[in-house]
Image (tube, helix red, strand yellow):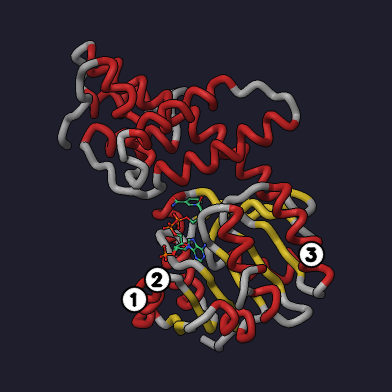
Amino acid sequence: MAQKDTVGVVGTGIMGAPMAVNLAKAGYDVVAYNRTPAKAEALVGDGVRVARSIAEVGAAAPIVITMVPDTPDVLDVVEGPDGLAASMAAGSVLIDMSTIAPGATRELAARLAERGIAMLDAPVSGGSWGAQQATLTIMAGGEQEVFDRCLPVFEALGKNVTLMGPSGMGQTTKLVNQILVAGTCSAVAEALVFAAAHGADLLKTIEAVGGGAAASWQLANLGPRMVNGDFAPGFMVKLQQKDLRLVLESAQEKHVPLAVTSIARAYYTALEADGLGEEGTQALIKAVERPAGLEARQRA
Ligand code: NAP
């Protein structure tokens, strides 16, 4: 395969690492930086080059992807000392694939535009499995022309890629996604604890209701992990808490009452208070089990 452009990746955590590998597999020259160097160095065998600094990534690549946790982290990586804003050339593109605040995204895009750097917000859904399989759903915000230029990069990472509108609309769409995900995950946890309390076979229950109107990604993927007692992340409770904070802040701006989402956030708050912030979001079932006084477990 002919070598394609250089693509930079800053943040090779649960999501960024497999994304960098998939870009290398698709023929891109990938240069990656991670704050904890070992996580980037682990990708060398998969054809990813390791940069010693964020500025080295910015100087090397006409397209740079950021995949870090929250708004202050993106601002740090882009505008902090040794950041991307100062090292990326005019005419290059920053693609932020982290989930952060839509308003801060629009402001950052405007500041970068003054330096001649284009920005797309392109948060993702599909979890670590989607990142590994290159089947992520990608929701982008920004200019059509910039999106078209970056589409081949997105196609190396995901399957369902949509430009939602101007800067910030990718992040807004991701928050819509998180309203659906958090509500559904809570319903799955409540349904399984209810089923266990009434003595139902839990795996059979998932199979039976999963073929009808109650079918969902959360039930099919996280339901079996809940009852198997597999709470490894995937998507960490603390990151979902961050997303739900962004959702509720945005909802408040427009006076939209999100009652179900607020309850889901309260479940996650209880888990964080118990020190479970680094477990996967399927640990939500523990917040329902505790008051019910039972564990809904059944090994496959
Ligand atoms: P993660 O495993 O915690 O990875 C985050 C990475 O960012 C780490 O490599 C971390 O470096 C780096 N980082 C954190 N703060 C930084 C800072 N201030 N400066 C520089 N680097 C920093 O998280 P993740 O699951 O990959 O999530 C990344 C983003 O994707 C988040 O916005 C999340 O909401 C979103 N997302 C995640 C999933 C999922 O299923 N996991 C799904 C959809 C979207 P260190 O190694 O040094 O800590």
The residue lying furthest to the front in this view is 81
Determine the residue positioned at 78% across, 80% down.
90
Determine the residue positioned at 42% across, 83% down.
47
Q: Is mark 2 within 8 Å of ligand 1?
A: yes
The residue lying furthest to the left in this view is 299
The residue under label 3 is 111
Which residue is more in the foreground, 20 or 206?
20
Determine the residue positioned at 52% across, 43% down.
242
The residue under label 1 is 42
Q: Secondary structure at mark 2?
A: loop
Q: Marks 3 and 2: CB-CB under 8 Å?
A: no
Q: Earlier in the sequence, mark 1 or mark 3?
A: 1
Q: Is residue 111 above or below residue 163?
A: below
Determine the residue positioned at 67% across, 52% down.
162
Q: Earlier in the sequence, mark 3 or mark 2?
A: 2
Q: Nearer the viewer, mark 1 or mark 3?
A: 3
Task: Please state the horizontal and vertical placement of residue 214, each as a whole percent of the image.
Answer: 44, 24
Q: Amino acid at mark 3?
A: Arg
Q: Secondary structure at mark 3?
A: helix
Task: Please state the horizontal and vertical placement of residue 286, each as a whole percent of the image.
Answer: 29, 29
Which residue is more in the foreground, 222 or 182?
182
Q: Is residue 134 above or below residue 82?
A: above
